[in-house]
């Protein structure tokens, strides 16, 4: 998955080549048990190791090494398109935003998962909540609000979206969700887990978010290593 993701980033960068724009690609090896680090280095990325398995901690580790004025976080099982990167770059150049997220697309979903994704898309756009698969933001804003909340094991991108929106509002900047070119991301969790497992997990989170989001043992869909 990491190879396809990196290939899509390089293709998108080439398609949007601008002599005044520079970039760096950092992959966080969050204590992986496969060839992620080796494959990422072979593809030309810089690899950062984070030994503690936590999504927000891994993202923060990558951000700590980044030198740019803007940060883009993308999951390894997602595919960046030239069109989406073009929209992101346009948003950066306009100078009116603190950051953005994107709607997402998954192929081959059963009807109930497709409906759930549609409901999430509406919620994301209305409340300006970024999906964890893609978050883009100014690095100064990210650092001033403290980055991803490491007390949370999932949904930290929603907290980050809220804080970035508040930080931006104080400076006349927006936090938006891009919709023209949805990010392609993997439906693997729908494949690996039954509908009962997924709805049971989400129900526990919705009924008791303060407890469940802070306990990795309560979040097996994200942390049990099933592949």
Image (tube, grey):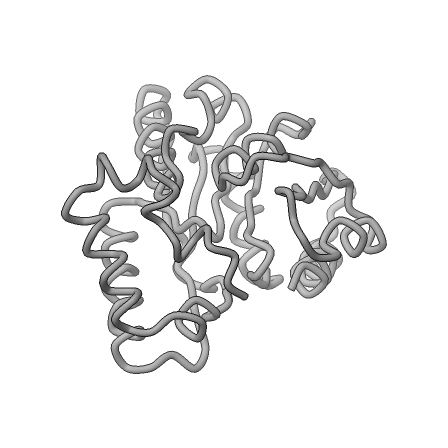
Q: Is 67 located above or below residue 219 in the figure?
A: above
Place residue 115 in its image quadrant.
Answer: bottom left
Residue at 38% of width from left, 70% of height from top?
Answer: 193
9 displayed left or right of 84: right
User: Which x, y percent locates residue 175?
Assistant: 37, 38
Q: Nearer the viewer, residue 157 or 200?
A: 200
Residue lying at the far left in this picture: please name it.
207
Q: Residue at x 63, y 35 (%)?
A: 51
Determine the residue positioned at 37% across, 45% down. Answer: 217
Residue 8 position by quadrant: bottom right
Q: Nearer the viewer, residue 23 or 147?
A: 147
Q: Outermost residue, front direction?
A: 217
**Which residue is rendered at x = 33% and y = 82% of the image?**
110
**Figure check: 122 above or below 93:** below
Position in image of residue 227 (x %, y %):
54, 66
Tell me residue 86's x, y (percent).
Answer: 58, 55
* Above or below, 188 relative to 64: below
Question: At which x and y percent is residue 47?
Answer: 75, 41
**Does residue 35 lie above or below 28 as drawn?**
below
Q: 128 or 83, which lies in front?
A: 128
């Amino acid at each position: 998955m990491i190879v396809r993701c990196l290939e899509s980033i390089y293709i998108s960068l080439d398609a949007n080549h601008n002599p005044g724009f520079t970039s760096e690609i950092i992959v966080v090896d969050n204590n992986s048990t496969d060839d992620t680090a080796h494959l990422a280095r072979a593809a030309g990325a810089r690899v950062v190791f984070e030994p503690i398995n936590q999504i927000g901690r891994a993202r923060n580790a990558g951000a700590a090494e980044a030198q740019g004025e803007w940060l883009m976080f993308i999951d390894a099982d997602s595919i960046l398109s030239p069109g989406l990167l073009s929209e992101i770059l346009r948003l950066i150049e306009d100078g009116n935003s603190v950051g953005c997220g994107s709607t997402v697309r998954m192929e081959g979903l059963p009807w109930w998962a497709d409906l759930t994704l549609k409901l999430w898309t509406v919620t994301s756009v209305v409340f300006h909540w970024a999906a964890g698969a893609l978050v883009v933001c100014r690095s100064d804003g990210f650092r001033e609000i403290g980055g991803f909340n490491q007390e949370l094991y999932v949904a930290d991108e929603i907290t980050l979206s809220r804080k970035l929106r508040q930080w931006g509002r104080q400076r006349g900047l927006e936090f938006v969700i891009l919709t023209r070119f949805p990010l392609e991301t993997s439906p693997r969790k729908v494949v690996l887990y039954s509908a009962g497992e997924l709805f049971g997990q989400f129900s526990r989170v919705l009924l008791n978010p303060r407890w469940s989001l802070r306990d990795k043992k309560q979040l097996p869909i994200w942390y049990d290593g099933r592949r």
